[in-house]
Image: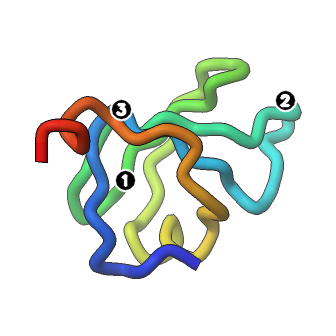
C-alpha cells in the first residue's frame, strides 16, 4: 500500500490493484490535491478519486513524472 504522505507528481504512472473494465491497470496522474485525478492509459477514461482511496488501491509506481526527476 502506498503511504498517505507519499509525494505524488503530475505525470506519474501507477498500477492499480483492480483492472478497469476496459482491461487497463495503468493510470496516469493528472490532478493532485484532496482528490487525485487519474486517466486510464488504455482507454483515456478520466476518474477523480479521494486521496485515501487512491492510496489504498494503488499497487506500484510504473513511471515517475518529470517533477520527480527535478528533486
Residue of label 3: 11
Distance CA(mark 2)–CA(mark 3)? 21 Å
Q: Residue furthest left?
A: 71
Residue drawn at x 58%, y 38% is 27
Secondary structure under badge 3?
loop
Q: Earlier in the sequence, mark 2 or mark 3?
A: 3
In the rendered view, tell whether residue 52 sits above or below residue 37.
below
The answer to whether mark 3 and mark 1 are in CB contact below 8 A is no
The answer to which of 15 and 53 lies nearer the viewer is: 15
What label does residue 36 carry, if any? 1
Q: Quadrant of residue 5?
A: bottom left
Residue drawn at x 59%, y 79% is 1
Residue 21: % across, % down:
85, 38
Q: Around disc 1, counting alpha carbons within 10 Å, would you say few (fewer than 14), some (14 to 19), or many (20 or more)? A: many
18 displayed left or right of 64:
right
Residue of label 2: 22
Q: Earlier in the sequence, mark 3 or mark 1?
A: 3
The answer to whether mark 2 and mark 3 are in CB contact below 8 A is no
Secondary structure under badge 1?
strand
Amino acid at each position: 500500500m502506498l503511504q498517505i504522505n507519499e509525494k505524488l507528481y503530475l505525470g506519474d504512472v501507477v498500477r492499480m490493484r483492480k483492472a478497469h473494465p476496459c482491461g487497463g491497470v495503468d493510470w496516469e496522474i493528472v490532478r493532485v490535491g484532496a482528490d487525485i485525478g487519474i486517466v486510464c492509459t488504455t482507454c483515456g477514461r478520466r476518474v477523480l478519486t479521494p486521496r485515501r482511496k487512491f492510496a489504498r488501491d494503488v499497487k506500484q509506481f510504473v513511471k515517475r513524472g518529470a517533477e520527480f526527476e527535478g528533486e
